[in-house]
Amino acid sequence: MGNCTRRSSPFLVAVAVALAGLAAAASTARAQSISRHERVQAKPITKAGQVVGFKLKVVVHSANFTNMQLGLGRASVREEIRQKGWDPGKMRGLLERQDKSYIRTQFPELAGLVNGQPKELELEVHYGKGNDLKPGDQVDVFSAWRGAGDGGFKHFFGVFEGGGHVFTTVTLPGAKPAAGK
């Protein structure tokens, strides 16, 4: 027997490349078919040179719900659950019960969202006014989704990972560094 040289057939290479492209497209389509938020930014609000709060900018995408509510959760709670053995059901339970051990603040519910039409939001939060938020806090940004006639929220985004979901955690803007530092 002689030496056998293994060569990749151009056809097999093309098939492999096509399959990889299809897998990437399917992953993108799955992520885009989930009601979600993205492009989250927290910019400081200053008064007399002091940071007194922040503007939360976010883009929301409805895939199949008309109503959405944004909230901020205590990121350390999610980490505690993760360390004890990750269970997405525990996070969902905190959100469904509107558990104050996790939820730091919630914004008014937004109704009338149209599927497939992104909506940019800008929300203002002032530290200590109806919340216990402080500069430098790490918070989860979550969105809760439901249809107009639904009794409770059916979908949550921002506190799970996988299947098109991603964690959304931001550090709240703090005081500006002193001059000369």
Image (tube, helix red, strand yellow):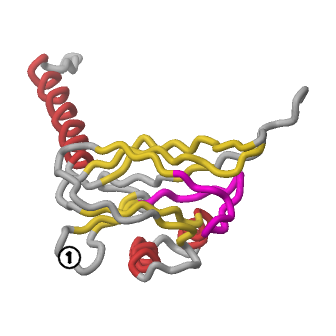
**Image location (x, y in percent) of residue 76:** 62, 66
For the residue pair 178 and 18, the one nearer the viewer reads as 178
* In this picture, residue 1 sits left or right of residue 154: left
Q: Is residue 161 left or right of residue 128?
A: left
Nearest to the observer: residue 154 or residue 133:
133
Give the quarter of the image for residue 165.
bottom left
Q: Is residue 8 above or below residue 66?
A: above
- Residue 115 picture location, percent across and down: 17, 51
129 relative position to 64: left or right: right
Q: Which range of residues does the magenta coloring cover?
A: 124-142
> Mark 1 highlights which residue?
150
Please say if 31 is above or below 159. above
Q: How many marks?
A: 1
99 shown above or below 171: below
What's the residue at 19%, 18% (across, down)? 7
Q: Against 17, is 177 above or below? A: below
